[in-house]
Amino acid sequence: MHGTKHLATVYFEIAPGDHLGRHTDSAEELLIVLSGEVEITVADETAKDPAGTLALVPKMAAHNITNIGDENVRVLGVFGGANNIVATFDKDWLPTHSNVVDTATLA
């Protein structure tokens, strides 16, 4: 995760058949699918989306991204208006071995 006082970004890749993990974030997030084909779930809505898709995730809305294609998916997440973001996953998440990722504790 990288950022400033009012804007933060996170870049991640997901292998074919894998998913990020259902979670909520303490700030609104804009997901930008840079490559690959994904299934994005936000709250009760699920859509299959190609590269170039933008998805807006409201603050504290449960969401997940699954790679449904044959190549690694590359995604950029952009968080606005927050200097500290807390993501709470349903299950423990690597590399923190916890279900909570708090940007205040990341180096």
Image (cartoon, rainbow, N blue to C red):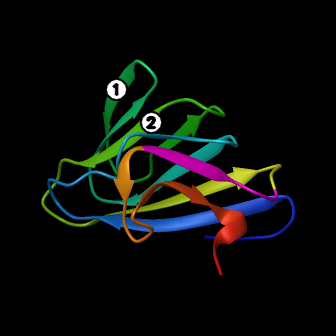
Residue type highlighted by circle 2: His
> From what the image shows, is residue 71 above or below residue 91?
below
Which residue occupies the foreground of this view, 36 or 77?
Answer: 77
Circle 2 packing at 10 Å, graded few (<14), some (14-19), many (20+), is many
The residue most toward the right is 5
- Which label is found at residue 58? none
- Which label is found at residue 63? 2
Badge 1 element = strand
Disc 2 to disc 1, how far (Cα)?
9 Å
Residue at left 66%, top 34%?
59
Q: Position of residue 2 (x, y in %)?
A: 67, 73
Residue at left 64%, top 51%?
86
Quadrant of the rendering where the N terminus is positioned: bottom right
Tell me which corner region of the image, top left, top right, bottom left or bottom right, holds residue 40. top left
Which residue occupies the foreground of this view, 87 or 72?
Answer: 87
- Left or right: 52, with 3 as reference point: left
Residue 8 magenta-highlighted: no
Residue at left 38%, top 58%?
93
Circle 1 packing at 10 Å, graded few (<14), some (14-19), many (20+), is few
Residue at left 61%, top 32%?
60
The residue segment tinted magenta is: 83-89
Disc 2 to disc 1: CB gap under 8 Å: no
Q: Position of residue 11 (x, y in %)?
A: 50, 68
The residue most toward the bottom is 107
Q: Which residue is mark 1?
A: 46
The residue most toward the front is 98
Q: Position of residue 36 (x, y in %)?
A: 28, 58
Work out whether mark 2 precedes mark 1 in sequence or the reverse, and give the earlier one.
1
Residue type highlighted by circle 1: Thr
